Amino acid sequence: MAKYVWYSNGTDVTGKELARQLGATGSKTKPANLRAGDIVLCWGAKTDEAVRLAAGIFVLNHPDKIRINRDKMAALRVLHGVRELTPTIAAFLPANEIIAAIDRGRMTLPVVGRKSHHQGGKGFWLCVTKSQVTKAAEAGADYFQKYIDIKDEYRLHIFRGEMIHAVKKVKNPSNDAWVSQRKDVLKEMAGERQLNEETMDFILNKLVKEYTLPDYVIRSNKRGWKFSTANNPPAALRTAAISALGALGLDFGAVDCAIDIGNHPYLIEVNSGPGLQGVALERYVASIRSWATEMERPAPAPRRAVREEAVPAPARARRAAVGAAEADVSDDDAVALLRVAESDEDRRNVLRLLRRQRG
């Protein structure tokens, strides 16, 4: 059983490290020569078209699901369409509808303009007037969302229905992150021209005084914030984060979420290839290894055949739920099996059966 990590330009740092620790092959392109039983971990893999993987391939975060989630407005529509998640999604509208909605009172200012495909704090316009909304749309904003007055912001790492790590954004008393980020920008802009490190440090440490940090609108490491371990994040956020991954069809992800000043929970977005280090990286590696071990375990030998008509329907369903069924299971059959399953272990076995037959 071979292991592959499929990452992208924006997720390759963590993707390469995961491949190293998992003893896997890493690449920015679709793995070639896949065989039944191989494992493909898609870490923010980017694709423009649908991807077909052969039956029997075990996949974590199918690239088709990642592609949908990368379109942030499309992902918001999916999440808003789930009844229990609807209250956690701040109102949003495409750019071509926002002005009319403001005029009719369907949307109130302030709003935040975003590009459908964005990363970090890029493609962000805070608009407190209609003229700012118009300018943001002209500058490239694809949609607008009601501004959330955040009290606390979290990132919850979810792996196959369980929270494996949680962090909270806290103020960073050091300016080092701000300086480091901008040094990288200056080096990129300078190209082959040589820049003196000491001079850059001197100038940037003076320049940072012209900024107000931390930034309470965009809470990123570039703007005076850092992640700190959160041992007990709000239960409402944890529940919503797990449901969000399920709604988007993702096996894992880092869910950015928040509590506003009125203590209302909100989902912001899901990251399918988050940058990891320290404890978060360790948790993902351990979780992936455990899952891979389960996938590598041989399927149980089939039980002695019993005439199906001799077994009552509920018993047949329970029997299938605990792993005795060998035939393909349709979605409707799976729902029926889950209804009659008598324990969480039975339900897990139904899910394992579905994953095995669908890859």
Image (cartoon, rainbow, N blue to C red):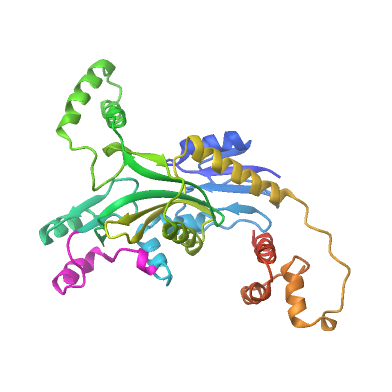
Q: Position of residue 299 (x, y in %)?
A: 78, 56
Image height of 266 relative to 208, above or below: below
Image height of 156 relative to 304, above or below: above
Q: Is residue 184 visible?
A: yes
The quarter of the picture where residue 223 lies is top left
Residue 97 sits inside the magenta stretch: yes
Would residue 11 be found to the left or right of residue 263 on screen?
right
Q: Residue at x 87, y 75 (%)?
A: 306
Q: Residue at x 22, y 37 (%)?
A: 213
The quarter of the picture where residue 207 lies is top left
Q: Quadrant of the N terminus?
A: top right
Q: Residue at x 84, y 60 (%)?
A: 301
Q: Nearer the viewer, residue 108 or 94?
A: 108
Would residue 264 be found to the left or right of residue 50 on screen?
left
Q: Residue at x 62, y 73 (%)?
A: 331
Would residue 102 be found to the left or right of residue 265 on screen?
left
Q: Nearer the viewer, residue 131 or 151?
A: 151
Residue 228 sits inside the magenta stretch: no
Total labels drawn = 0
Q: Position of residue 322 (x, y in %)?
A: 74, 66
Q: Quadrant of the C terminus?
A: bottom right
Image height of 261 relative to 191, above or below: below
Q: Position of residue 249 (x, y in %)?
A: 51, 61
* Residue segment shown in magenta: 86-110
Q: Is residue 15 visible?
A: no
Q: Nearer the viewer, residue 7 or 282?
A: 282
Q: Nearer the viewer, residue 179 or 75?
A: 179
Image height of 110 relative to 312, above or below: above
